[in-house]
Amino acid sequence: LAKTTQPISMDSYEGQEVNITCSHNNIATNDYITWYQQFPSQGPRFIIQGYKTKVTNEVASLFIPADRKSSTLSLPRVSLSDTAVYYCLVGIQGRDDKIIFGKGTRLHILP
Amino acid sequence: GAVVSQHPSRVICKSGTSVKIECRSLDFQATTMFWYRQFPKQSLMLMATSNEGSKATYEQGVEKDKFLINHASLTLSTLTVTSAHPEDSSFYICSAVRRDSSYEQYFGPGTRLTVT
Protein backbone atom coordinates (compact mmCIF):
# COMPACT_ATOMS: atom_id res chain seq x y z
CA LEU A 1 0.00 0.00 0.00
CA ALA A 2 1.46 3.33 -1.05
CA LYS A 3 2.18 5.80 1.72
CA THR A 4 0.72 9.26 1.43
CA THR A 5 1.88 12.60 2.78
CA GLN A 6 -0.43 15.57 3.23
CA PRO A 7 -0.22 18.87 5.07
CA ILE A 8 -1.42 18.44 8.64
CA SER A 9 -3.67 21.47 8.51
CA MET A 10 -4.78 24.34 6.31
CA ASP A 11 -6.80 27.50 6.82
CA SER A 12 -8.77 29.34 4.18
CA TYR A 13 -11.63 31.80 3.86
CA GLU A 14 -15.14 31.40 2.64
CA GLY A 15 -15.51 31.80 -1.11
CA GLN A 16 -11.93 30.92 -1.92
CA GLU A 17 -10.66 27.92 -3.84
CA VAL A 18 -8.74 25.46 -1.71
CA ASN A 19 -6.13 23.09 -3.04
CA ILE A 20 -4.82 20.23 -0.93
CA THR A 21 -1.86 18.36 -2.30
CA CYS A 22 -0.97 14.78 -1.45
CA SER A 23 2.35 13.09 -2.18
CA HIS A 24 2.47 9.39 -3.02
CA ASN A 25 5.88 8.70 -4.46
CA ASN A 26 5.61 4.91 -4.50
CA ILE A 27 2.21 4.65 -6.13
CA ALA A 28 1.80 1.41 -8.07
CA THR A 29 0.61 1.08 -11.64
CA ASN A 30 -2.79 -0.29 -10.65
CA ASP A 31 -3.40 2.16 -7.81
CA TYR A 32 -6.18 4.71 -7.85
CA ILE A 33 -6.20 7.92 -5.82
CA THR A 34 -9.22 8.52 -3.64
CA TRP A 35 -10.15 11.40 -1.37
CA TYR A 36 -12.48 11.21 1.60
CA GLN A 37 -13.98 13.90 3.79
CA GLN A 38 -14.71 13.41 7.46
CA PHE A 39 -16.67 15.63 9.83
CA PRO A 40 -16.30 15.23 13.60
CA SER A 41 -18.06 12.15 14.96
CA GLN A 42 -19.07 10.95 11.50
CA GLY A 43 -17.81 8.27 9.14
CA PRO A 44 -15.69 9.27 6.14
CA ARG A 45 -17.53 10.34 3.02
CA PHE A 46 -16.25 9.64 -0.49
CA ILE A 47 -15.41 12.81 -2.43
CA ILE A 48 -13.64 11.87 -5.61
CA GLN A 49 -11.44 9.26 -7.23
CA GLY A 50 -9.05 9.33 -10.16
CA TYR A 51 -6.28 7.51 -11.92
CA LYS A 52 -4.62 10.17 -14.07
CA THR A 53 -5.05 13.69 -15.48
CA LYS A 54 -8.15 15.44 -14.19
CA VAL A 55 -11.42 14.32 -12.71
CA THR A 56 -14.28 16.63 -11.82
CA ASN A 57 -17.57 16.03 -10.09
CA GLU A 58 -20.19 18.23 -8.49
CA VAL A 59 -18.16 18.90 -5.37
CA ALA A 60 -14.48 18.83 -6.31
CA SER A 61 -11.78 18.37 -8.89
CA LEU A 62 -8.80 16.08 -8.72
CA PHE A 63 -5.61 16.89 -10.58
CA ILE A 64 -3.05 14.16 -11.16
CA PRO A 65 0.21 14.87 -13.01
CA ALA A 66 1.64 12.47 -15.53
CA ASP A 67 4.05 10.82 -13.08
CA ARG A 68 1.16 10.27 -10.60
CA LYS A 69 3.49 10.83 -7.66
CA SER A 70 1.20 13.48 -6.28
CA SER A 71 -2.37 14.65 -6.58
CA THR A 72 -4.27 17.81 -5.74
CA LEU A 73 -7.80 18.01 -4.46
CA SER A 74 -9.42 21.28 -5.45
CA LEU A 75 -12.49 22.58 -3.65
CA PRO A 76 -14.07 25.56 -5.43
CA ARG A 77 -15.56 28.43 -3.43
CA VAL A 78 -15.44 26.80 -0.02
CA SER A 79 -17.94 27.53 2.71
CA LEU A 80 -17.83 27.11 6.47
CA SER A 81 -19.41 23.70 6.06
CA ASP A 82 -16.32 22.47 4.24
CA THR A 83 -14.40 22.56 7.52
CA ALA A 84 -13.41 18.92 7.93
CA VAL A 85 -10.53 16.47 7.70
CA TYR A 86 -9.62 15.37 4.19
CA TYR A 87 -7.87 12.06 3.58
CA CYS A 88 -5.92 11.09 0.49
CA LEU A 89 -5.69 7.34 -0.07
CA VAL A 90 -3.89 5.33 -2.66
CA GLY A 91 -4.72 1.77 -3.52
CA ILE A 92 -6.80 -0.52 -5.62
CA GLN A 93 -10.13 1.01 -4.62
CA GLY A 94 -12.68 -0.94 -6.50
CA ARG A 95 -11.78 -4.25 -4.93
CA ASP A 96 -12.39 -5.53 -1.42
CA ASP A 97 -8.96 -4.42 -0.35
CA LYS A 98 -8.47 -2.77 2.98
CA ILE A 99 -7.99 0.97 3.11
CA ILE A 100 -5.20 2.34 5.28
CA PHE A 101 -5.80 5.93 6.29
CA GLY A 102 -2.98 8.44 6.62
CA LYS A 103 -3.10 11.41 8.97
CA GLY A 104 -5.25 13.57 6.72
CA THR A 105 -5.44 17.34 6.36
CA ARG A 106 -7.50 19.33 8.82
CA LEU A 107 -9.09 22.14 6.78
CA HIS A 108 -10.47 25.09 8.67
CA ILE A 109 -12.60 27.59 6.77
CA LEU A 110 -12.81 31.05 8.28
CA PRO A 111 -15.64 33.52 7.74
CA GLY B 1 -26.28 5.83 -2.93
CA ALA B 2 -25.50 2.81 -0.80
CA VAL B 3 -26.19 3.08 2.91
CA VAL B 4 -24.35 1.55 5.83
CA SER B 5 -25.81 1.87 9.31
CA GLN B 6 -24.35 1.30 12.73
CA HIS B 7 -26.13 0.61 15.97
CA PRO B 8 -25.94 2.00 18.49
CA SER B 9 -24.69 5.43 17.53
CA ARG B 10 -23.57 6.08 21.07
CA VAL B 11 -23.11 3.80 24.06
CA ILE B 12 -21.87 4.21 27.60
CA CYS B 13 -20.94 1.14 29.59
CA LYS B 14 -19.23 0.27 32.83
CA SER B 15 -15.74 -1.11 32.97
CA GLY B 16 -15.70 -4.89 32.73
CA THR B 17 -18.86 -5.23 30.69
CA SER B 18 -19.16 -6.19 27.02
CA VAL B 19 -20.63 -4.09 24.25
CA LYS B 20 -21.85 -5.18 20.83
CA ILE B 21 -21.84 -2.84 17.85
CA GLU B 22 -23.74 -3.73 14.69
CA CYS B 23 -22.83 -2.74 11.15
CA ARG B 24 -25.45 -3.24 8.44
CA SER B 25 -25.45 -2.65 4.72
CA LEU B 26 -29.03 -1.56 4.13
CA ASP B 27 -29.45 -1.77 0.39
CA PHE B 28 -26.64 -3.98 -0.85
CA GLN B 29 -24.81 -7.17 -0.02
CA ALA B 30 -21.32 -6.83 1.38
CA THR B 31 -18.69 -9.49 0.83
CA THR B 32 -16.31 -7.75 3.17
CA MET B 33 -16.66 -5.32 6.02
CA PHE B 34 -13.92 -3.46 7.82
CA TRP B 35 -13.76 -2.18 11.38
CA TYR B 36 -11.85 0.95 12.34
CA ARG B 37 -11.17 2.75 15.57
CA GLN B 38 -10.54 6.46 15.83
CA PHE B 39 -9.28 8.37 18.84
CA PRO B 40 -9.83 12.13 19.17
CA LYS B 41 -7.84 14.22 16.70
CA GLN B 42 -6.37 11.09 15.14
CA SER B 43 -6.87 9.22 11.91
CA LEU B 44 -8.84 6.04 11.45
CA MET B 45 -6.96 2.91 12.44
CA LEU B 46 -7.93 -0.34 10.77
CA MET B 47 -8.69 -3.02 13.33
CA ALA B 48 -9.85 -5.99 11.30
CA THR B 49 -11.25 -7.28 8.06
CA SER B 50 -14.49 -9.22 8.30
CA ASN B 51 -15.53 -11.66 5.58
CA GLU B 52 -18.94 -13.29 5.51
CA GLY B 53 -18.83 -16.86 6.73
CA SER B 54 -15.19 -16.88 7.77
CA LYS B 55 -12.98 -15.73 10.58
CA ALA B 56 -11.97 -12.11 10.72
CA THR B 57 -8.44 -11.03 9.94
CA TYR B 58 -7.01 -8.75 12.61
CA GLU B 59 -4.37 -6.09 12.16
CA GLN B 60 -1.17 -6.34 14.13
CA GLY B 61 -1.61 -5.25 17.72
CA VAL B 62 -5.38 -5.77 17.82
CA GLU B 63 -6.45 -8.42 20.32
CA LYS B 64 -8.82 -10.84 18.63
CA ASP B 65 -10.11 -12.19 21.95
CA LYS B 66 -11.01 -8.73 23.10
CA PHE B 67 -12.59 -7.48 19.89
CA LEU B 68 -14.83 -10.27 18.67
CA ILE B 69 -16.07 -9.93 15.12
CA ASN B 70 -18.89 -11.94 13.60
CA HIS B 71 -20.00 -11.62 10.00
CA ALA B 72 -22.99 -13.93 9.92
CA SER B 73 -24.66 -12.64 6.78
CA LEU B 74 -23.93 -10.55 3.71
CA THR B 75 -25.56 -7.53 5.34
CA LEU B 76 -24.46 -7.72 8.97
CA SER B 77 -21.20 -7.68 10.87
CA THR B 78 -20.90 -7.24 14.60
CA LEU B 79 -18.02 -6.06 16.77
CA THR B 80 -18.13 -7.03 20.43
CA VAL B 81 -15.79 -5.27 22.81
CA THR B 82 -15.35 -7.72 25.66
CA SER B 83 -14.45 -6.72 29.20
CA ALA B 84 -14.29 -3.11 28.17
CA HIS B 85 -11.95 -0.70 29.91
CA PRO B 86 -11.76 3.08 29.80
CA GLU B 87 -8.91 2.91 27.29
CA ASP B 88 -11.31 1.20 24.87
CA SER B 89 -13.35 4.40 24.74
CA SER B 90 -13.19 5.49 21.13
CA PHE B 91 -15.13 6.08 17.94
CA TYR B 92 -15.69 2.81 16.08
CA ILE B 93 -16.44 2.94 12.35
CA CYS B 94 -17.27 0.16 9.94
CA SER B 95 -17.18 0.09 6.16
CA ALA B 96 -18.78 -2.34 3.76
CA VAL B 97 -17.68 -3.46 0.33
CA ARG B 98 -20.48 -3.76 -2.16
CA ARG B 99 -20.86 -7.26 -3.60
CA ASP B 100 -21.26 -6.39 -7.22
CA SER B 101 -19.16 -5.09 -10.05
CA SER B 102 -18.42 -1.79 -8.37
CA TYR B 103 -16.73 -3.16 -5.22
CA GLU B 104 -17.02 0.30 -3.75
CA GLN B 105 -16.57 0.82 -0.03
CA TYR B 106 -19.14 2.68 2.02
CA PHE B 107 -18.61 3.87 5.56
CA GLY B 108 -21.02 3.76 8.44
CA PRO B 109 -21.76 6.80 10.65
CA GLY B 110 -19.71 5.48 13.55
CA THR B 111 -20.39 4.44 17.14
CA ARG B 112 -19.12 6.45 20.08
CA LEU B 113 -18.16 4.11 22.92
CA THR B 114 -17.51 5.51 26.37
CA VAL B 115 -16.37 3.16 29.11
CA THR B 116 -16.70 4.51 32.64
Image (cartoon, rainbow, N blue to C red):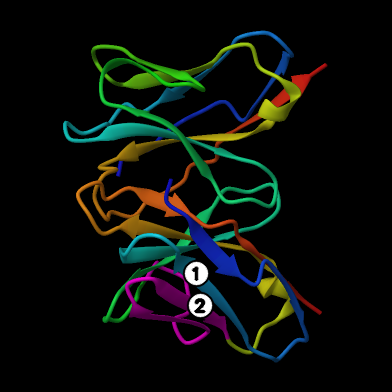
Spatial distance from mark 1 to mark 2, Cα to Cα? 8 Å
Circle 1 residues within 10 Å: few <14, some 14–19, many ≥20? many
B94 left or right of B84 in image: left
Q: Is residue A87 left or right of residue B50?
A: right
Q: Nearer the viewer, residue B50 or A101?
A: B50
Q: Earlier in the sequence, mark 1 or mark 2?
A: 1
1 vs 2, front mark: 1
| Direction from residue A44 to residue A42 in the image, left or right | right
Q: Position of residue B78 (x, y in %)?
A: 48, 78
Q: Amino acid at mark 2?
A: Leu
Residue annotated with mark 1 = B23
Q: Position of residue B15 (x, y in %)?
A: 75, 87
Which quadrant of the structure image shows residue B21?
bottom right
On the same chain, marks 1 and 2? The answer is yes
Element at label 1: strand
Residue neighbourhood size for the residue with mark 2, other residues' Cα within 10 Å, grouped as few (<14), some (14–19), many (≥20): many
